[in-house]
Amino acid sequence: MATTLITLTQQVLEGMGQYRLLDVTTGGSATVATSTHLRRWVGAADVLNDRWFVRFTNLNDTTPSTANRDRLITDSTTSTVTYERATSVNTSTTDPDQFLLLSFDPSFITAAINSAGQYLFHRGMYLPIRDETLFVDNLLSNSSFEDTISGSDHPSWTNVGSPTVSAETTHVMLGSQAARLRGSGSAAGQMHQGVDNTQLANIGGKTIHLQGWVKEYTASRARLRIDRGDGSTFSNHDYHSGVDQWERQLVEADVLDTAGAMTIRAYIEGGTASVTSDSRFDAVVMWIDPLYRYTIPSTMVRGPYRVQMQMDVDNPNGHYRSISRGLRPISGRALRLTGKGAMSTLSADTDSAEISGDQQKLLVTRAIFELYSTLGGAPSSQRDHYLREADRWYVQAERMLGEGMADGPKLATDEADGWHVENEGETRYLMLDHVRDSLTLSSSL
């Protein structure tokens, strides 16, 4: 399960005895909130000026954006607070808006929660990660279209013409996303990704392999194709049958043995707008020669502890076996890496941490320590109180760690036999140890 930042914030403040959630009782303005409940906390005018803050949890019946959430109070009475105007959004308050009344900068809470998550990762509280975005010998990036679309393009892919491109999350072959593609007018939609000859050596005359999964419900609309290096010589797969199911396509062609610069491009070609046809593509990979080094995804902070390979070429979600001396990597096959990730960094109220139960209690306890430590670091009449509270919550967090409350599910591990990990600066690489001859590689084994 996951827990949102707004829930963690409430639990931190409740633990500190600082949770003051007030209702707006009368419509105000972009800089004024009126609440008859303020008199419980404010005995006279100007008490809160330039020292207290409001954090809106509900603004015009919606969760406010991060930029429109926190305000420094500049004037106060027993029933109103006046605060700094937002720089990006100016929204008038109204009943039933709600806000937290805080004696410190609300951003300190989020920083404390994130600091606690980072600390606890190094004390054993981790997110289990299973990654399936790498493929043996693959020359392409973002083959499974898992990266978030930037503008109108899938990252690493270039649109041809003006196709409609989106992330598909329902019809997916591997992972959590696929590419959804529709052309403009009667033209087929196309995306391509190139590998230029500065990245390859002695490839003239060698065989290019392009493989991927395609889904369509209209015949003669979707296929894979290869630009063999000169921008005009193509090798095409037959079009998808039009039966609304995933079909694996494999195109093989020789690299043109030409002089000068050349770029080999993998193309996906999909449905047309005129027939309201959307094509889906997933796990699109291209290879020529063996590759031995693979960048480990940055979400996997520790590991991998197990590296497995897809065994059935026609079932990416089927059986996987561990890479070992007895199992050589096969080109085009998906790799499954198992490792550890850290808790997500939270910013917006709706952002969530992948924790619950004992781990959530531990995170809140450590975050309260972090917050009191921050407050105790600045000159204040309450500095001694803050530091005493920091010591108290530190002891509680350490006791909870000693009781094993950071522990998550145990990860399956293998001896690194046939692979190892190398580090270069902050980048980590998976190295496949088997020496392989490109002539023996086949995706159909």
Image (cartoon, rainbow, N blue to C red):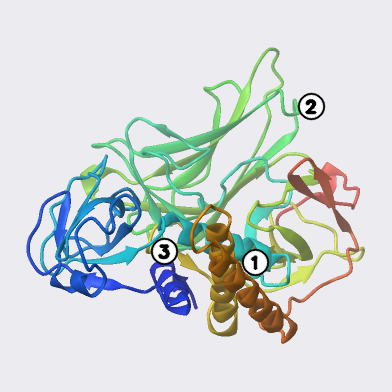
Please, what is the three-letter code of the amino acid marked with disc 3? His
Name the residue beneath numbered marker 2: 201
Give how far across and how far down residue 387 sits, in percent: 60, 66
Choose top left, top right, bottom left or bottom right for residue 102.
Answer: bottom left
The answer to whether one can see residue 409 in this image is no
Give the alpha-carbon distance from disc 2 to disc 3, as whole Å. Answer: 37 Å
Please tell me whether mark 3 or mark 1 is closer to you in this view: 1
Report the front residue among 389 and 201. 389
Work out how far the residue at label 1 is from the one at label 2, CA to CA, in angstroms: 33 Å
User: Residue 330: x and y, percent?
Assistant: 77, 56
Image position of 168 (left or right of 391) = left
Q: Relative to 158, is 257 on the left or the right?
A: right
Circle 1: element type: strand
Q: Which quarter of the figure has residue 300?
A: bottom right
The residue to which callout 1 is attached is 130
What amino acid does circle 2 point to? Ala
Residue 328's place in the image compared with 395, above or below, is above
Q: Position of residue 13 (x, y in %)?
A: 43, 73
Discs 3, 1 touching: Cβ within 8 Å: no
Residue drawn at x 45%, y 42% is 154
Residue type (three-letter) at the residue carrying disc 1: Arg
What mark, if any, has residue 171 been given in the picture?
3
